[in-house]
Image: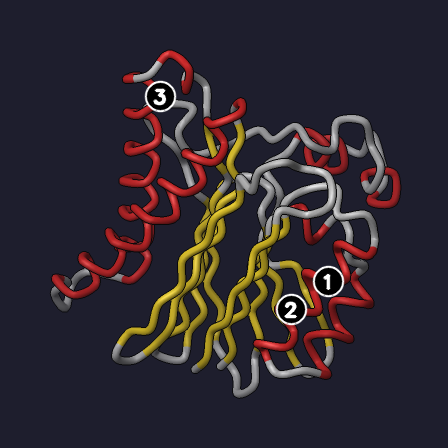
């Protein structure tokens, strides 16, 4: 199993408030992407803190696990610890009050793909030439789509597109969604911030992920988002079975 990652500030922002972490386990790989929000420094601190705490907590919990502890429990606990770390920092410094971050994390292990997420950073699966979005955005626009007020096409450029309804660090506790699917040979998982998903088309994602090794694909995804405007920070983590 392989993992590759890249992040970029984009063409408009002055600071990169995205963060990621990746790692290899004895029998798998994991990756996490966070997209921070909350003022000049808050977003960067929130995103970086969440990615670092999730990664270290997941690794420690995984190494300490017993036979009765599921991978889902470990991932959800790591997300709770990341949430607590960001929330506690926001209470200590008034300038950081209200900061938060998205989180999407994936572990590929034991012939399974397991994902936790909160916010609108996404996980996609490329399998046999078909790209599927695994996660559902926690966003105002997604709620409008779900309730039938707007179409998927209208959602692409909606005025509320950047308003998320769930994030780490904004409250004392957070709920994360969990997804699990069986892994197949050559499956490719893309974790990304909305600075990528908003600027690279579905068709282009398929092309880049299908035609390149994961290191080259990560570079091309960032380059393509920048070529299409680069209006936000851009992060791509690619995991391959």
Q: Look at the picture and state if 182 lies above or below 11.
A: below
Residue at 52% x, 31% y: name it.
166
The residue lying toward the viewer, choosing from 14 and 239, is 14
Residue reaching furthest to the top = 94
The numbered dot on residue 90 is 3
State the separation of the CA atoms marked 1 and 3.
Answer: 34 Å
Sequence-earlier tag: 2 or 3: 3
Q: Residues within 10 Å of mark 1 (few under 14, many from 20)?
A: some
Mark 1 — residue?
Answer: 223
Q: Which residue is mark 2?
A: 219
Nearest to viewer (mark 2 / mark 3) = 2
Residue 88's tag is none
- Say if 64 sits above or below 139 in the image: below
- Quadrant position of the N terminus in the picture: bottom left
Q: Are marks 2 and 3 in contact (CB under 8 Å)?
A: no
Check the image and name the residue furthest to the front.
Answer: 14
Measuring 85% from the left and 40% from the top, which residue is drawn there? 151
Name the quadrant containing residue 72.
bottom left
Q: Measuring from the top left, give residue 66's x and y in whole percent.
A: 12, 65
* Label 3 environment density (alpha carbons within 10 Å; few <14, some 14–19, many ≥20): many
């Amino acid at each position: 199993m392989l993992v590759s990652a890249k992040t970029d500030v984009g063409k408009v922002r002055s600071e990169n408030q995205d963060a990621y972490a990746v790692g290899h386990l004895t029998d798998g790989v994991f990756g996490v992407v966070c997209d921070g929000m909350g003022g000049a420094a808050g977003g960067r601190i929130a995103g970086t803190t969440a990615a670092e705490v999730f990664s270290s907590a997941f690794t420690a919990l995984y190494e300490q696990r017993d036979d009765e502890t599921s991978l889902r429990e470990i991932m959800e606990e790591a997300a709770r610890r990341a949430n607590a770390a960001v929330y506690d920092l926001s209470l200590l410094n008034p300038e950081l009050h209200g900061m938060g971050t998205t989180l999407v994390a994936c572990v590929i292990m034991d012939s399974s793909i397991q994902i936790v997420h909160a916010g609108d950073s996404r996980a996609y699966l490329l399998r046999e030439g078909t790209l599927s979005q695994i996660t559902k955005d926690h966003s105002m626009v997604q709620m409008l789509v779900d309730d039938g007020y707007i179409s998927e096409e209208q959602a692409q450029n909606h005025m509320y597109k950047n308003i998320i309804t769930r994030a780490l660090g904004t409250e004392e506790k957070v709920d994360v969604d969990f997804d699990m699917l069986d892994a197949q040979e050559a499956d490719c998982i893309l974790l990304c911030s909305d600075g990528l998903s908003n600027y690279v088309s579905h068709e282009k994602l398929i092309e880049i992920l299908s035609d390149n090794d994961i290191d080259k694909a990560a570079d091309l995804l960032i380059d393509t988002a920048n070529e299409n405007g680069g209006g936000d920070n851009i992060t791509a983590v690619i995991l391959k079975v």
